[in-house]
Structures are given as C-alpha cells and as structure tokens.
C-alpha cells in the first residue's frame, strides 16, 4: 500500500506541476485520509472532551484542586520528592501544585523538585508560584530570578511586557508553567494594604495596558498568566487573609474602574483568572465572597466579560473563606462557576464534599466535565499532556 501511495503521489505531483493546478494537499487528503496505521488517529480521540470521558469521577474532581505539596505528603515542609509525596501524587492526582517559601532553598533544588513531580504524575499538574515582583516574590533571593520591583513603579506597557517576558523565561527554566501574576487590581482606595504597591496604579486605563502587556510577555514564554484578584480588590480596607473583606462599590463603579484591566487581560489571552474573596453587597445583594458568588463568576466574568478560560479561586484557607467548611466552600465555588479550587483548608474534606454533592445531584457530572475539559484543554495546548 505504501509503495502504491508513493507512486501515485509522484504521478499527481508531476501532473499538477505541468497543469499549474493547485490544491495538491487537499487532493492527497481526500485520496488518503488519515488512519491509525498512518499515525493519524481520529481527531475526536485526541480531544480534551474525549480525555475527560476516560477519567473516573474521582480523577476529574482531583484535577480541580490546586494545592501546596504538603497537602499531599503530610510533611511540614516539602523540598524534595519524598516517599510520602510520591504516594500523595498517586492517591490525589491534583490538577495543580503551588510552591511557597518553605519549598524553595536553591535553584537546583527547585528545578529538581519540579522535575520529579512531573515525572511522578500521570497527568502533569500546573506548577505555579507567586512571583509578582515587589512585595510578593518567592524566587529572587535563592533562585536567581530577577527582582522586578514594585509594579507601582513600572513606567510603561513596554516595561510591563519586558517584565512578563523575563518572568516567563526565568520561571520556565526552573520548570514552572504558571505564575500567579499579574495583579490586575486598580488601587481605588489608597489606604488599601492588601494590594498597595502590588498594583500598577490608580488609573484604570493605564493599569489595563500594563496588565495586557505583561500577560502577552509572560505567555509568549510558555508560562500561563493569572489575572488577579477579580473583580478587583483595590477598594477594600480590610485584608481577606484575616477575615471577611467588604467593599461598598456598586456595579456601575466597578465597571468604570476595577473591571477594565480584567477586560484588557482577557483580550490579551490570559489563561487564568483568580477570583478574590472580596464581598460586594451592593453588587450581589449579600456578603458572600466573590469566589463563591455565581453572580460574580458566571454573570459578570463569564457572561458579561465573555471569559472562557480557567477560573481559579483565591486560596480557600484564607480567613474570608474559612467561615465555611472546606466541603461547603468547594461546592459553592463550583456552583458559582469556578474550575479550580486553590488551597482548601482541608483537602480531603473539600474533595469529599464535592464528591457528595455530585452523588446527591446538587452538582451534575456534566458541570464537572465543563471545568475539567477547560483544564485538560490548556494542559494539552501547553504540551503538558499528549
């Protein structure tokens, strides 16, 4: 068959050259459609949806969790692939792992840990870190990653793009494929302490240009960007790490300021949006954290802004979220439209709560499939899975 195919190809090519015809590729494709023996298995078999269908419900749910390595190993501080971490990766095949200061000792150590995690995972997890520059940097001291200074001091979109490119290149060299940056918050309230100089500034349009540029720069280096902290945390005074954080801003006000950089970052192709725990009672009608609010995630982020990438919550072990049990917080976040659940206070309780909700019919498995399809689609696009 192959000899006949090659002979026909030569004849067709010669004929097309003589006649000046075009469409050679289309003709060949029609005559010899891809088959499994030719190395061209049907595209449907390689689609993310098909991959989701091959996972058990339990495997799907684990893909929706993004955790610190200690949540898998039970150790106080993980700096290498121990036997307990390897076992945790087998038992709890989570979708993402984030490193903090306790996991970071040196450049070689971090690179080795990330490499070992990849090698020990059946489905490569997203591997992330908070590396914003300025107040929030995990890698500049021990790993040779550039300290880019406060984002408030960035002078132009070109400089923001350079920061994104540099961060993307340096993190990728270490083995990370995701950075929890840029901060897309507009500093509406200058007394805000949670965001402060982490923000690009007080002017929504200026912040928007810099956010989009950093997203483009970072993702051009193969590292996913995370827009945070939707729908904008720059107006609050209290810190959501410590407890409930409330802003009295109206929907009209946030449309005119806070949402503008997120719209810009989404247009730039940001792979992730992180939703904060900020409560906006004049927008939602309650003090439910944004991370657990269907109005914020589905109505505004998905429907109004048209975002179809991965939505991840802010850390669910923060004070503003721990007023709920780990199981209930996870269920509420998924009902609201979140795809990934960051750092629940108790991983097993969070997973079991979600599993129970699906089995009881509170959440459909089709809803779970939507999120897992987004997760696996991006992993395939990034080359993390075949």
Image (cartoon, rainbow, N blue to C red):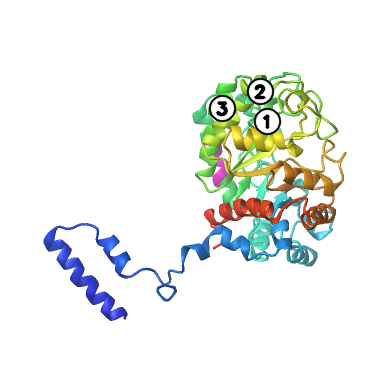
Q: Which mark is residue 195?
A: none
Q: CA distance from mark 1 to mark 3?
A: 13 Å
Residue 49's place in the image compared with 138, above or below, is: below
* SS under mark 3: helix
Crowd around label 1: few <14 · some 14–19 · many ≥20 (10 Å) = many
Q: Which mark is residue 254?
A: 2
Q: Which mark is residue 231?
A: 1
Q: What residue range appears in magenta?
A: 162-169
Residue 129 magenta-highlighted = no
Looking at the image, residue 214 sits to the left or right of residue 181; the answer is: left
The secondary structure that dominates the magenta segment is: helix
Image quadrant of residue 109? bottom right
Residue furthest out toward the front: 361
Residue identified by numbered label 3: 208
Asked whether the beta carbons under mark 1 and mark 2 sit within 8 Å of each other, the answer is yes
Crowd around label 2: few <14 · some 14–19 · many ≥20 (10 Å) = some
* Residue at the spot 68% in from the left edge and 51% down from the top edge: 367
Q: CA distance from mark 3 to mark 2?
A: 14 Å
Looking at the image, residue 372 sits to the left or right of residue 289; the answer is: left
Which percent across, then down, holds residue 380?
Answer: 55, 57
Q: CA distance from mark 1 to mark 2?
A: 8 Å
Which percent across, then down, holds residue 158?
Answer: 49, 30
* SS under mark 2: helix
* Residue at the spot 65% in from the left edge and 50% down from the top edge: 371
Specify which label sits upstream in the sequence, 1 or 2: 1
Which percent across, then down, holds residue 376?
Answer: 60, 56
Asked whether residue 107 appears in the rendered view, the answer is no
Specify which label sits upstream in the sequence, 1 or 3: 3
Specify which label sits upstream in the sequence, 3 or 2: 3
């Amino acid at each position: 068959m192959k000899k006949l195919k090659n002979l026909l190809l030569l004849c067709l090519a010669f004929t097309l050259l003589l006649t000046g015809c075009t469409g050679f590729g289309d003709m060949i494709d029609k005559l010899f459609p891809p088959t499994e023996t030719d190395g061209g298995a049907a595209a449907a078999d390689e689609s993310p949806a098909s991959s989701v269908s091959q996972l058990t419900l339990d495997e799907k749910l684990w893909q929706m969790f993004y955790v610190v390595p200690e949540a898998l190993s039970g150790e106080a501080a993980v700096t290498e692939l121990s036997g307990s971490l390897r076992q945790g990766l087998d038992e709890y095949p989570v979708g993402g792992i984030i490193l903090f200061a306790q996991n970071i000792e040196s450049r070689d150590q971090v690179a080795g840990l990330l490499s070992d995690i990849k090698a020990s995972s059946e489905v490569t997890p997203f591997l992330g870190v908070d590396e914003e520059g300025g107040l929030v940097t995990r890698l500049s001291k021990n790993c040779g990653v550039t300290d880019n200074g406060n984002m408030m001091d960035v002078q132009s979109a070109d400089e923001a793009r350079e920061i994104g490119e540099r961060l993307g290149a340096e993190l990728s060299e270490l083995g990370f494929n995701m950075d929890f940056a840029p901060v897309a918050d507009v500093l509406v309230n200058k007394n805000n302490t949670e965001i402060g100089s982490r923000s690009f500034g007080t002017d929504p349009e200026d912040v928007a240009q810099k956010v989009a540029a950093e997203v483009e720069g970072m993702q051009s280096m193969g590292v996913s960007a995370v827009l945070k902290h939707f729908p904008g945390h720059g107006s609050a005074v209290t810190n959501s790490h410590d407890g409930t954080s409330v802003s009295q801003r109206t929907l009209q006000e946030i449309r005119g300021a806070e949402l503008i950089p997120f719209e810009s970052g989404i247009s730039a192709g940001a792979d992730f949006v992180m939703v904060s725990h900020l409560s906006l009672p004049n927008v939602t009608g309650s003090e439910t954290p944004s991370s657990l609010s269907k109005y914020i995630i589905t109505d505004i982020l998905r429907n109004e802004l048209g975002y179809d990438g991965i939505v991840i919550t802010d850390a669910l072990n923060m004070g503003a979220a721990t007023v709920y049990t780990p199981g209930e917080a996870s269920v509420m976040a998924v009902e609201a439209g979140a795809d990934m659940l960051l750092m629940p206070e108790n991983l097993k309780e969070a997973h079991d709560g979600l599993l129970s909700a699906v089995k009881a019919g509170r959440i459909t498995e089709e809803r779970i499939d939507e999120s897992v399809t987004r997760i696996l689609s991006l992993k395939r696009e990034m080359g993390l899975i075949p």
